[in-house]
Amino acid sequence: MSETNREIAAKFGIDIELIEEKVDIQKNIDILGNDLTFLGVREFERTKHVHRLHPYLGKFIPQLVEVFLRRYFKRGDTILDPFSGSGTKLVEANILGMNSIGIELSPFNVLIQKIKTKKYDIPEVEREIKDALRKLKAFSRQITTGERPLFGKEIERFETESEYLKEWFSDRALQETLFYKSIIKDYKNQDILKIILSRSARSARLIPHYDLARPKKPVRETYWCIKHKRYCTPIDEVLKFVNRYSYDTIRRIKEFDKLRTDAFIKIYQGDGRTIKLPANTKIHGIFTSPPYVGVIDYHEQHRYAYELFDFPRLDDLEIGPARKGQNGVAKSEYVKGVLDVFKNVSKYLKNGALIFVVANDKFNLYPEIGRQCGFKLMDVFQRPVLMRTERDSNKYFESVFYFKKVKRK
């Protein structure tokens, strides 16, 4: 490990000895030109441009994708991510001039991906975002000050049948949320406004400031805040977040627009085990991170968005959800699910295609998964997961499995 990285690790109390025990730092540097600790990558670089348009639990940092795509693929190649999540790989591939295909089960995740990767009329987007924000500010003034609308109309109240929304939001926050939702239909760039509202709703829930990722229950009373080291009160509005994220979204879309290339990005919503791609699809490689067995319920983490926009819930099709745990049955189901995905997409891979799978494989499942798919295991790279944004003190290491599709005899 470089002296600079040692200094950074010491500053943040990171256990260097544990890293060097688990990770072959020199091997990573020799082969990849990077030690894969990413200690010198600051938070704003890990969440650069559209990668922070909407929070997503469990995504990998863009720098990890960039290292492997630069090392093993070239401009014009087509890379598949059959578990494309929030679209990190799709964005990074495009910046490098590589075509990309994403397959994702969750309809809401697909929305996030499309918003990140779409080519926009920037002035039009900026105009619509600011106009929707202006209308929300006017509505918020009415409900907080009693200011009457024009022509003596009554202040409109919005209702919802969602018990979840009524439980997890204050009355003011819920009214602002439902008002903003009601005006989205008036704009051309409706999906961007949905993402702004969803991101804002996530922040405006009645939860502790330090527990955005996995809140257990609503908080309506003053509480001791671990993040701010003082007593805090629950959030009472959505307006301030819509204001913040409106300008943030405009800035991030502009930043990515300057970096994007003409490489194509194709996104398919569906089950990777059964989805059919166009017959002429030819893929040079895969870079992906499947769900980790028994760790995250992917639909539930964005329940606020599903409740707001009535997306269909496909929880029963999730592979390795947290609610099923990590027992023997759960692991067997998980292996079968991942196997079925790779076997299904394998027919679109060119012979000699390279497959990279990022996994916290504490149950040592992936060597056998690769073998059963007819993939030859070429190498395994280890890396620590450091500087995580969610509140989690667990020691955490990932493996990057490097497979190659070999022609069957």
Image (cartoon, helix red, strand yellow):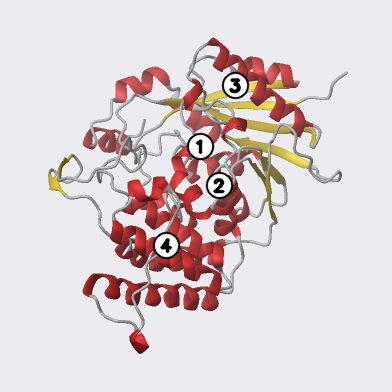
Relative to 372, residue 68 above or below = below
Please indicate whether residue 145 sits to the left or right of residue 384 in the image.
Answer: left
| Residue count near mark 4 (Cα–Cα under 10 Å), binned few <14, some 14–19, many ≥20 | some
In this figure, which residue is indicated by the disc labeled 2? 109
Q: Quadrant of the C terminus?
A: top right
x and y percentages locating residue 327 in the rendered image: 50, 12
Q: How far apart, in angstroms, are the residues tagged by discs 3 and 4?
A: 38 Å
* Mark 2 or 4: the one toward you: 4
Q: Is residue 140 left or right of residue 269?
A: left
Residue 115, given in percent of the width and then of the height, sits at 56, 59
Which of pointers 3 and 4 lies earlier in the amino acid sequence? Answer: 4
Classify the position of the N terminus by image quarter: top left
For marks 1 and 4 on the same chain, the one whose residue lies earlier in the sequence: 4
Spot the residue most to the left. Answer: 230
What residue does disc 4 label?
178
The reply to whether residue 74 is visible in this rendering is no
Residue 165 at least partly seen: yes
Give the tally of numbered discs.
4
Whether residues under marks 3 and 4 lie with C-beta atoms below 8 angstroms apart, the answer is no
Q: Residue at x 62, y 40 (%)?
A: 105
Label 3 sits on residue: 334
Specify the amino acid type for callout 2. Asn
Which of discs 1 and 4 lies nearer the camera? The answer is: 4
Measure the C-alpha gap from mark 1 to mark 2: 9 Å
To which quarter of the image does residue 248 belong?
A: bottom left
Q: Residue at x 52, y 63 (%)?
A: 192
